[in-house]
Image (cartoon, rainbow, N blue to C red):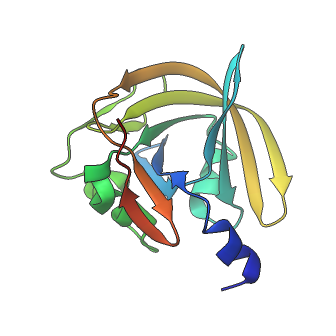
Amino acid sequence: MSVLTEAMAQLAAGVAVVTVRDGRDDLGATVSALMSVSLEPPLVLVSLASRGYLNEVLLRQDRWAASLLSSGQAAIASRFATPGRPSARLLLEGVPHHRGPHTDALVVEGGVAALEAETTKVVPAGDHTLFVAAVLAVCYVDPSLNPLVRLRGRYRAMGVT
């Protein structure tokens, strides 16, 4: 582990699953680099490893969804973080989900929030790619649940009051 990786692991980050429909297949990955960029207009940013397959697909498919996971969804985060994973449909088997009406991407239910977005700008950034996206819709927000966070290389439940 590099010193920078260790330093950045000290910063708690929310955990989300980004999904996209690519023709007949569904893809997704766990991310902890998703953030709000602007409220007017509503913009978000996600950072993906440039060598990843999801990055390749998002370069050709502009519309995607992000499900912000709740503390009880660490298993879902782990499924989508595993290398060589199967279709997102298989990863969500037995997990409540639906297709977003604006993106046709899979949206995980039971999280703290979910949104649909359309990429408006792509920025290469070292070994990652930044996707700036307009928010098309907020699918749901559930402030009664605690968010799942990643801190020091582990998923942790975040207790909020």
Q: Who's the residue at 20% across and 47% down the image?
A: 95
Query: In this view of the protein, can residue 105 be seen by the observer?
Result: yes
Quarter in which the N terminus is drawn: bottom right
Q: Who's the residue at 68% across and 26% down the image?
A: 43
Where does residue 139 sit, x and y in percent of width and height?
40, 23
In front of the other: 42 or 155: 155
Quick check: 14 left or right of 132?
A: left
Quick check: 146 left or right of 1?
A: left
Say above or below: 87 vs 107.
below
Q: Who's the residue at 46% across and 21% down the image?
A: 138
Q: Residue furthest bottom?
A: 1
In front of the other: 7 or 39: 7
Where does residue 121 sit, x and y in percent of width and height?
79, 35
Quick check: 135 left or right of 74?
A: right
Quick check: 138 left or right of 131?
A: left
Say above or below: 151 vs 103.
below
Say above or below: 97 vs 87.
above
